[in-house]
Image: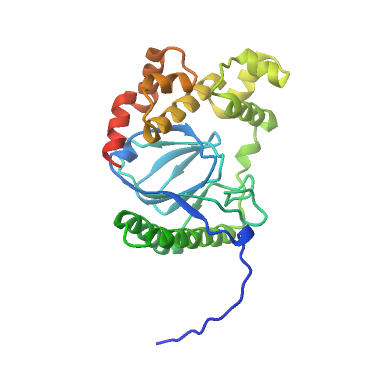
Amino acid sequence: MTLINFHSKYKSIFKHDNIPELFTVSDEDGFTTDIPRATHHHDDRVEISLIIEGEAHYVIDEVEYHTKKGDIIIYNSYTTHEEQPIEGIHLHKYSCGIGNFQIKGLDKNCLLPKNAKNIIPSEDHFDELSGLMSLIYKQVKSEYIDYAESVNYLARSLLLLILHIIHAHKHETDESIFEDGELSCRIKQHIDDHYLEQMSLESIAAALHISPYYVAHVYKNAFGHSPMQYIIKRRIGEAQTYLIQTNLSIIEISNIVGFNNTNHFNNMFHKIVGLSPGTFRKAMLKLQ
């Protein structure tokens, strides 16, 4: 046996020494991972996923990634992302949403520096990371006495472990983000800020002081699809969030996310998700 004495004073890397707060935790295996999650973001948390088994496609800030077992996926607050299953491939992952923290040198509820890669291999830390996320999930499900305080301290440990892994990879950047210049990113940011409003190529062009043709050309050249297709995906992703988290009717949600015609909303939702809004909501409610 080796006894290690530990007594060390330290300064917390968290501003104001806040205890991060666990917002969500999930063990997704099977049915839920077979349903596409359209483009969305979280404005109050960082989301961390760990692929336990299988593979999947992810689109993060309009950059495509292919993930496999052992990959860590990190979404800073306000980072847009979508999740696409691969037909015939089983996917199992743990996910945690954690907020109410700020690490010195980074924006609130962020783990990654700007332009850092969102996908990082866990490598030698896979067992440690999967064990910690599994423990958080099991404690939340068990609801034993004072579990809330326990899981928030575990969430803090999870963030610190992820930061260690990030630093080991030396903040690798994804150069593909810059290949098509700054304008495509400005177009995307404008859409992300206004996608719930009535938008057109002409209104985007007017806001950015360029021609509608140039908006469409630059965006498709950078991301492979049109700005209007991205707007639809953002609206459907937001609708999925409302269907999961609220009791609002489908008509109300359709209006909130920018569809004036509920039939058009239903058709677009089914085209992107593969289920009707009502079927999607029922499926998600059964799993909660």
Q: Position of residue 94 (x, y in %)?
A: 38, 51
Q: Position of residue 276 (x, y in %)?
A: 32, 23
Q: Position of residue 236 (x, y in %)?
A: 44, 26
Q: Residue furthest left?
A: 286
Question: Would you place residue 5 above or below residue 109 in this image?
Answer: below
Q: Residue furthest right?
A: 209
Question: Would you place residue 26 above or below residue 162 in this image?
Answer: above
Residue at position x 47%, y 22% from top? 256
Question: Would you place residue 178 above or below residue 260 in this image?
Answer: below
How are the colours assigned in the image?
A: rainbow
Quadrant of res 202: top right
Left/right placement of residue 265 relative to residue 200 reads left
Q: Position of residue 212 (x, y in %)?
A: 65, 14
- Numbered-mark total: 0
Query: Camera-side residue: 220 or 283?
Result: 283
Q: Residue furthest front?
A: 145
Quadrant of res 213: top right
Query: Camera-side residue: 262 or 167?
Result: 262
Query: Camera-side residue: 98 or 28?
Result: 98
Identify the image quadrant of the C terminus: top left
Query: Camera-side residue: 265 or 164?
Result: 265
Identify the image quadrant of the N terminus: bottom left
Residue at position x 29%, y 36% from top? 285
